[in-house]
Amino acid sequence: MKNTALTHIHESLGAKLVPFAGYNMPVQYEGVNIEHEVVRNSVGVFDVSHMGEFFLKGENALALIQKVASNDASKLVDGKAQYSCLPNNEGGIVDDLIIYKIADNNYLLVVNASNIEKDWNWISKHNDLGVEMINASEDYSLLAIQGPKAAEAMQSLTSIELSNMPYYTFQIGEFAGKSDVIVSATGYTGSGGFEIYFKNEDAEEIWNKVFEAGASFGIKPIGLAARDTLRLEMGFSLYGNDISDTTSPLEAGLGWITKFDKEFTNSENLKKQKEAGITRKLVGFEMIDRGIPRHDYEIADAAGNVVGIVTSGTQSPSLGIAIGMGYVPLDLATPDSEIYIRIRNKDVKAKVVKTPFYKK
């Protein structure tokens, strides 16, 4: 197992560590529900240094991104980030990612930890354009500082005006006394905040300064279990659960990042799928009867026929009800459609709802 530059701190704080994507990662400190509420109401800090960072440089950097990514990266201006995905040749998704435009001919791609090698090989395979590719995943640490008080709590550490940063923009500047830190108004929780990218050697000092600055705001370290409940309440897809090598971006509700005014990997076939119409769709659902849906549970219709699969599910800490996501046929995909989750051989009633589940 690899460690992040901060693993020793998580150990000293009594975090429960679990193997995740080849790393020892903190899954929880005080408990999922407590940590979840901290992020929803004040400010919490996730060590997500296991994520991957690729820098793409050179005059053909944009052309390579346009070739492998579904969204239109030509729309990016300096300091703007964009959510996108890497389609494969079979109609599925290699990974979802965030693309940052640092300057002309200079981009940062942030990819999922479990897919670093796969994504690197995939993009490299398509790089017949002489683009300089740097895999900096082992050199960078990443903190997600999330919650409604994040801007106020962190403002003393930087001259970057945090409260006015639009969503999905970023600036590179001084943070916690360190230069060249990427401060990004992104996150995976739906409660606002920032993601901070910096070199590993600065990790411990930045962590300590973040917690000093946030002390009067009730800042706490947060584990990956709460990250999962927070993202699920927002209906955000998790790679390996809700999207994968076998799920189409259109089925997954990612048509908004699939732009057919340019060519990209498998765009022709995805365009045909759009024209023909999808046959299944990723939906959110709430449990009506008692029971908690879990990944890979079967979804049945009223007649007891298995029609789909649960991709994510939990007891929502914010809402006090069990929620989930899964793929169902189109005739069961409209809100208020009745579906059944098969829990221990019993079909438990649920209804399809619009996401996000959690509304601020």
Image (cartoon, rainbow, N blue to C red):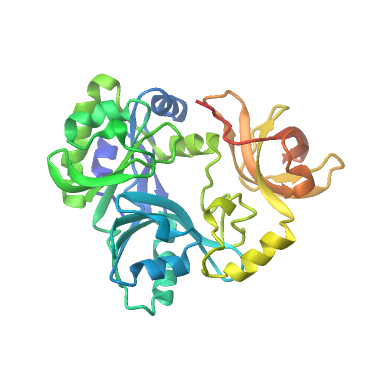
Whether residue 145 can be seen here:
yes
Count of labels shown?
Answer: 0
Residue nearest the observer in this picture, 265 or 26 = 265
Q: Is residue 216 above or below residue 349?
A: above
The image position of residue 203, as x and y in percent, is: 20, 45
Q: Residue 333, located in which quarter of the rendered image?
A: top right
Q: Residue 291, located in which quarter of the rendered image?
A: top right
The image position of residue 259, as x and y in percent, is: 54, 59
Q: Is residue 256 above or below residue 274?
A: above
Whether residue 1 can be seen here:
no
Query: Farthest left residue?
Result: 177
The image position of residue 327, as x and y in percent, is: 68, 49
Which residue appears at 43% of the width and 55% of the height?
A: 97
Which residue appears at 18% of the width and 45% of the height?
A: 173
Left or right: 40 in relation to 195: right
Q: Is residue 206 above or below residue 70?
A: above
Residue nearest the observer in this picture, 232 or 102 = 102
Left or right: 316 in relation to 298: left
Query: Farthest right residue?
Result: 303
Which residue appears at 67% of the width and 60% of the height?
A: 274
